[in-house]
Structures are given as structure tokens and as C-alpha cells.
Amino acid sequence: MKQLKRNAALFFAGLMLSAAPAAVSQAADKPTLAFVVNGASDFWKAAEAGVKKAQSEMPDYQMELKYPEQAAVAIQQRLMEDLVSAGVKGIMVSAVDPKTQTDGLNKIGSQTALFTTDSDAPKTNRVAYIGSSNVDAGMQAAEIAKKAMPDGGKCIGFVGLLGADNAKERIQGMKDGLKGTKIELTDVRGDDIDQTRAKKNVEDALVASPDVTCMVGFYSYNTPRIYEALRDAGKLGQITVVGFDDDPITLGGVKEGTVAATVVQQPFEWAYQGMKLMAAYLKGDKSGVPSNGLIIIPTVIIGKDDVDKYAASLKAMAGK
């Protein structure tokens, strides 16, 4: 009897082992689509939820969101090349520095379907960009500043990647929106997506520019670092803070009135719509790609009275 049980166990184990390669092969047959971000940040959690929703609606694809080890061009490029080598059929990327990545992005675009998000690379062979109009977002930041400082003031901005198009366009949009007013954006300091450096930049600015009356956080984590630095310096509520994106600290500051308002993007929609667009494109359906290659998801200003409703919508998108 023991021998029979042992033989039966070996038989079923053999069946399981013989089935395993078939399962792996079946999974490998699914086309893989990747969403590659520019660096580690809580901002991308909404995009993760968007990828997850798209995956639930398109089980015939394997969808992934990938973080580079560091917000550096070479590291992001290596990650994309590894994905191409692994057979990924489509990549949507928020390029770290599009202007210096043209050759690298074109290399990826020659081997797989390449789309951009967040920060466009229009001089490459990418199929389309899906994301915000960063110029419009910058102009909305100017509207927040004008409403909060009708008598004018001096602003200093903080951003992750000074060379990225999304940063340059937001800064330019805000400057354009402030023309003809007594508010001036005098300086913008970069931190290369280093959280510690981001806070130190604010601390240094408080010392170097004691006359500053406004601070702008152009990336999602910049406003929280501004908030923390002002809190630690006992200046929270004394300096107008203009935010970008929807970090919980930022939304909390808006609700309590220490952050004037924040301009929010929709990375959930970038990822959700982007994955569906890539899947359709790979099937030969190019109807979703406009002639100018731009799919703009509007940005929205969230003020004190909007926070609770907006926070509820974020939970709903994440399935909570």
C-alpha cells in the first residue's frame, strides 16, 4: 500500500512538472506592454492602478509598470533595452531627459512600439504622447498664485529634473501666466529626484532669499518637501505655496489652508488609456492616434473646497 501511494505521488508530481513548461509557454505567448517611469515617486501609484485596471480588461496581454533604479538617462535606457531583449511589444515611457535621449529612444522605437507620457520626446520616432499639457498646467499654477497674492510677490520654484520637457514647460507656462502681474518666478532649483536634496533646496532658499513670499513645487514630491521645510522653520502659512499633483501631504496642506491650491494631473488615465491604446495599435488599429500624435489629458486645480471629493475619487480609481 505504501508503495502504491508512493508511486501515485510520483505519477502526479510528474504530471505537474510536465504541465509547468506548457503554463510558462502559454504565459510567454501573451504580448507584454510596459509603462516605464522616470524615477521612484508615490506619484506613480495612480499609474500602477491604471495599469492594473487595463490588465483586468485585457487578459490576453501582460502589463507591467517598471521603475528605474535611479532617475538617470543611462539607467532608464538600460531598463528599456532589457525589456526589448525580453520581447516586450510596446513601451510607454516618461523620459528622464528627452533632449539627450533622442538616439536611445529612437533605438527603442525601432525595435518596439514606443509611446511617451508625462514628458514628451517629439523629436523621436515615438508613436504618440499621452499626458498633460505641461504649459497649460504651468499657467494654472500662475492662476493659483495670482489669486493667492493679489498684491504681488517673489516666487522660487523647485523641481526634480530641470532638463526634462515637463519641467521646462511648466516653468514657462507659469512665467507666461504671470506676465503683466507683480508676481515673479525668480529662480527654480532642481534636485534630480532626490528627496533629501529636495528638502534641503527649500531650506537653503529660505536662508539665501529671506524676502521670498511664494514657493512652487513643480513635481509631485516637491510640495511635500516645501511643506516640511516651512513647518520646521516655523514659516508654514507665512509663505504662499503653489502645488502640483496629489501627494497626501499636499492635499492635507490644501485642506488646512497652508497650500494655496494644487494642479493635479491624471496619471491613472495616462496608464489606463495608454495601455489600451498600445494594445489597439499592436493589433493594427491606429484610429486612436491623432494626426499630431498628442493625446492631452486635462489638468485640474484642486482648492480647499475640492479636496474631499477629489480624495474620494482617487480611492475609487484605486479600487478601495
Image (cartoon, rainbow, N blue to C red):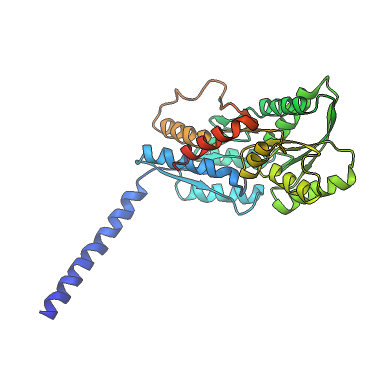
Q: Where 177 sits versus 246, above or below?
A: above
Q: Which quarter of the rendered picture does the C terminus lie within?
A: top left
Identity of the residue furthest to the left in this view: 1
Instruction: Work out which quarter of the rendered image holds the N terminus and state it.
Output: bottom left
Toward which corner of the image does residue 152 lie, by quadrant? top right
Between 150 and 135, the one nearer to me in the picture: 150
- Residue 92, how many percent across, how many down? 53, 38
234 over 263 or under it: above or below: below
State left or right for residue 189 relative to residue 46: right
Picture coordinates of residue 172, whole percent (x, y): 75, 28
The one nearer the camera, 40 or 142, is 142
Q: Residue furthest bottom?
A: 2
Q: Is residue 42 visible?
A: yes
The residue at the point 65 percent across, 49 percent down is 71
Number of marks present in the image shown: 0
**Visible residue check, residue 122:** no
Left or right relative to 189: residue 288: left
In this picture, residue 263 sits left or right of residue 317: right
> 282 or 173, which lies in front?
173
Image x and y of residue 274, in percent: 49, 34
In which image quadrant can residue 188 be found? top right
Expressed as whole percent of the image width and height from the top left, the position of residue 222 reads 70, 43
The residue lying toward the viewer, choosing from 113 and 140, is 140
